[in-house]
Amino acid sequence: MNKILKSLAVTAMAVLTMSFQTMAQTVQDGLKNLEAERYNAAETIFKQLASSAPTAENYYNLGYFYLNLQDDQFDLVKATDAFTKGAATNEKKPDPLNRVGLATVKLLSGDRVGAKADFDLIKKDTKNKNADVLFRIGEAYALNAKINDPAEAVLNIQAALDLQKVKNNPDFYIAMAKAYLIKNDGGAAMTALENAANMGQKLAVIKTLMGKVWYQGKQYQKAQGFINEAITADPTYSPGYFLLSNLFTTFGKYKQAAENAKLGLDNSEATPAAKLRYIKLATASKDYDGALNVLNQIFDAEKDPIKFRLKGYIQTEKGECAEGVKNITQFLTQAAKERHLASDWGMLGRAYACIKDDANKKLNDSLAIINMDIAVEKGDSTFDYNGAIINTYKVAKNWPKVAERYEKNIATSKKPADATVYYNLADSYMRARNFVKADTVYSKAIELYKDIWMFPHIQKARAKQYALGTTVDSTFLAAALYERYINVSTDAMKADVKNAKYFSEAYGYLGYKALLVEKNPAKASEFMNFALKYDPTNTKATQVLQSISGTTPPAGTTTPPNNATPNGGTSGGTQPKN
């Protein structure tokens, strides 16, 4: 009889041991899925555990899951339900961890004072001797990127670590690293993560966080190294691929960025939320076809109006601009104002700008400029809206508006404008036939170019002459500019065939001056011969030479010889980069 009882007892213990091991492994599976952002799998495991074994621990894990949903989201109603049930498993002494969970709900709901009072009471009730309680309180303060207190987080986690004789739980250091990241203290975060890594557990999580630290510090090569280590540690860890996609997008390596975004999706659960994350990354990495393909799969079922933003952005980038306007407008109409981004207005402006509709071009251009201006005012620096606005005015040949925009950019820019900006401003004034303004601004461009590019001297000389209108240039007021153009230009500049007509123009002008003002036919002939050397088609130079060798000098007009029309332009060689 005793043998039978002993055998039954051994069997029962074996079953209980196996059940406990299976349950413990299942808890770890749930936590691993949560860390890997496989939320459906994690929720299924935690709900099954709480249902089959309604213990304080299982209810706590279920509530904890609801506080750690995708993209810093949480479900406070479901979390409260789980923690309340967990705390009630012991009527005489409510479970302290579930009490921490309920206080965390209070914190995330915005009641910081009430949460702090509850945390302090729980610490008092556990005599500040329960390391798990202190750790979870500290973790609560670093759980959310928007609602947090990293100083309290570090204080409580450190108190928990101080109670441990053997520090073998990497979660303590991971939570501390997250708190330091909120404080933007990368050095302290890395130290915490190194301590976690030394335990040899959760290396994919830890290495990805290390990569994030270096990524935020713009140390991209080091970031990539740690992310690669994370993926090596666990090739199914989707957050590593998603972060690597962000990194490659930063590099401008869009092909690799798209590939890693897809790997992140393939190793996630491919839920609508995961697909939305992929679509955002694929769009950023310029994989518009891949992003649109997945977006279309979830579009009808997805309730979040962000689907309209994403589709509108993609359509605009693909040149489907009218549809882009429609969807971005739909997003702005449906989404709460706090979700609107400056880039939404910018992309809406870009969409209007690229609509191919000649009948409504003037209206669309106007709406494009209005919306891109809003994006600039709201601080969006992801796109050169000012350049796009200027280009819109240029296409419409609205040169006064081009000049106005350049002036505005110079006045509002945090950086001093360079020579190219001033040249372009002068050029727009030239095309707008505001020659006095062009003359003034060319002086600034000449000053900043420092004789590296001499063509602005030609343009300034022309501006001076055009400003006279029908008045005869009897004093040859542009002579000094033409002389400087000739004298300062290098041999290489003089040998460049693209500059030949400008040297011909300069010598021709000076030849007129020598003949009409200085009354020096010999000098005039010399200059006119140089003019013909550079441009044998310079008919005015030929006429002057013929008149000098004949009986009557030419009529006194000083219109710049050949190729000099008040149209601005960037002739005379390519502008050097500043």
Image (cartoon, helix red, strand yellow):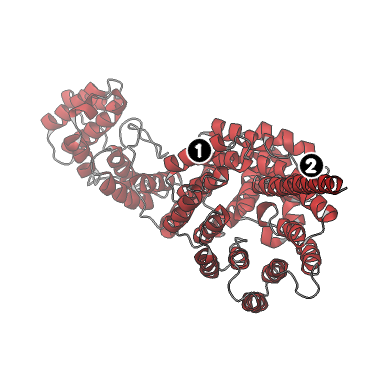
The amino acid at mark 2 is Phe
Residue at 14% x, 27% y: name it.
Answer: 526
Q: Is residue 438 left or right of residue 389?
A: left
Q: Nearer the viewer, residue 115 or 507?
A: 115
- Residue ranking furthest to the right: 1
Where residue 345 sits in the image (x, y, percent)?
63, 53
Q: Does residue 471 lie above or below 67 as drawn?
A: above
- Front position among marks 2 and 1: 1
Residue at 44% x, 48% y: name it.
Answer: 218
Where residue 575 sits in the image (x, y, percent)?
34, 36
Residue at 27% x, 23% y: name it.
Answer: 535
Q: Residues within 10 Å of mark 1 (few under 14, many from 20)?
A: some
Where residue 93 sits in the image (x, y, percent)?
75, 74
Where residue 403 sits in the image (x, y, percent)?
46, 50
| Residue named by callout 1 | 229
The amino acid at mark 1 is Glu
Residue at 35% x, 33% y: name it.
Answer: 574
Q: Earlier in the sequence, mark 2 or mark 1?
A: 1
Residue 299 numbered tag: 2
- Quadrant of the image occupied by residue 474: top left
Q: Residues within 10 Å of mark 2 (few under 14, many from 20)?
A: some
**Would residue 133 be seen by someone viewing this image from the given angle?**
yes
- Quadrant of the image occupied by residue 222: top left
Q: Does residue 550 lie above or below 244 as drawn?
A: above
Q: Is residue 341 left or right of residue 441?
A: right
Element class at badge 2: loop
